[in-house]
């Protein structure tokens, strides 16, 4: 079994610069304007499935991709961002002002401890790995778009990029950025990253 997934970060919302995990903002005006360019960049891929987080910023990003291919969006709540609980919707400055001791402790030990009341990183990582594996089994020999969130993409890539010949700057995951990964012979690999809409285009899957 060999399949290709294009991991796509959703377009922009009004919570840019805030902790936005399970919060559910819609795309803002700028985000909606980003969709046409994204669809054009992905138009070369022969998608057989389109998956999305159930949060509306991801689903709204996935809809035009699916429409272009004549497909429906497969909604998976397990593709959600990590839950920040009490920190949802706050900026880092607001968090530091509210609870500087815990905030600094969280920063020093990241990702070992969760946001107050939030999802543990180990649980989040396992959720994402299990979801990607399940998507690969469903897609089988095809190619799928997976529209999700920055934390999901960074976490998944950090698990599969572990060799010198697979360099990646995982700190960069701009709105509508895309990452091409392959599942083959039971192993994931990163084929190509395009960390911003202005970066070099991804190569279409043969």
Image: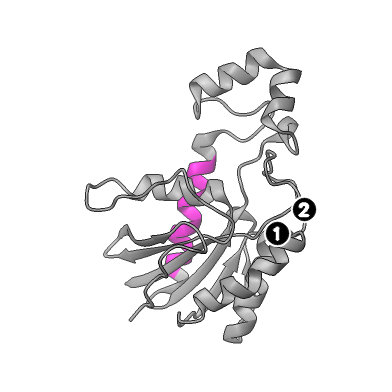
Which type of secondary structure does the marked residue at label 1 adopt? Answer: helix
The span picked out in magenta is 124-137
Q: CA distance from mark 2 to mark 1?
A: 6 Å
Q: Magenta region, mostly helix, strand or loop?
A: helix
Image point 30% across, 50% down: which residue?
Answer: 167
Image point 55% across, 49% down: which residue?
Answer: 150
Foreground of the two, 19 or 126 = 19
Q: Residue furthest front?
A: 198
Residue 78 lies within the magenta run: no
Q: Residues within 10 Å of mark 1 (few under 14, many from 20)?
A: many
Image point 41% across, 78% down: which residue?
Answer: 142
Foreground of the two, 35 or 133 = 35
Q: Could you tell me which quadrant the C terminus lies in?
A: bottom left
Percent of width and height locating residue 40? 55, 78
- Residue 57 bears which disc, if any? 1
Foreground of the two, 30 or 88 = 30
Nearer-N-terminus badge (2/1): 2
Q: Residue furthest bottom?
A: 70
Q: Are the residues flagged by discs 2 and 1 in contact, CB closer than 8 Å?
A: yes
Image point 24% across, 47% down: which residue?
Answer: 163
């Amino acid at each position: 079994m060999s399949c290709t997934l294009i991991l796509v970060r959703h377009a922009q919302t009004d919570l840019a610069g805030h902790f936005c995990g399970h919060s559910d903002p819609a795309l803002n005006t700028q985000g909606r304007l980003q969709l046409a360019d994204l669809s054009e960049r992905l138009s070369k891929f022969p998608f057989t499935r389109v998956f999305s987080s159930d949060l509306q910023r991801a689903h709204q990003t996935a809809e035009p991709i699916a429409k272009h291919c004549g497909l429906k969006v497969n909604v998976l709540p397990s593709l959600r961002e990590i839950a920040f609980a009490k920190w949802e919707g706050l900026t880092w400055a607001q968090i530091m002002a509210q609870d500087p001791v815990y905030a600094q402790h969280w920063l020093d030990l990241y990702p070992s401890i969760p946001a107050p009341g939030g999802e543990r990183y180990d649980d989040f990582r396992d959720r994402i790995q299990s979801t990607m594996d399940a998507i690969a089994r469903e897609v089988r020999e095809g190619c799928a778009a997976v529209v999700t969130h920055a934390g999901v993409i960074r976490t998944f890539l950090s698990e599969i990029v572990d060799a010198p010949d697979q360099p990646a700057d995982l700190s960069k995951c701009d709105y509508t950025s895309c990452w091409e990964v392959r599942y083959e012979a039971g192993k994931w690999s990163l084929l190509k990253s395009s960390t911003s809409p202005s970066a070099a285009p991804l190569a279409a899957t043969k």
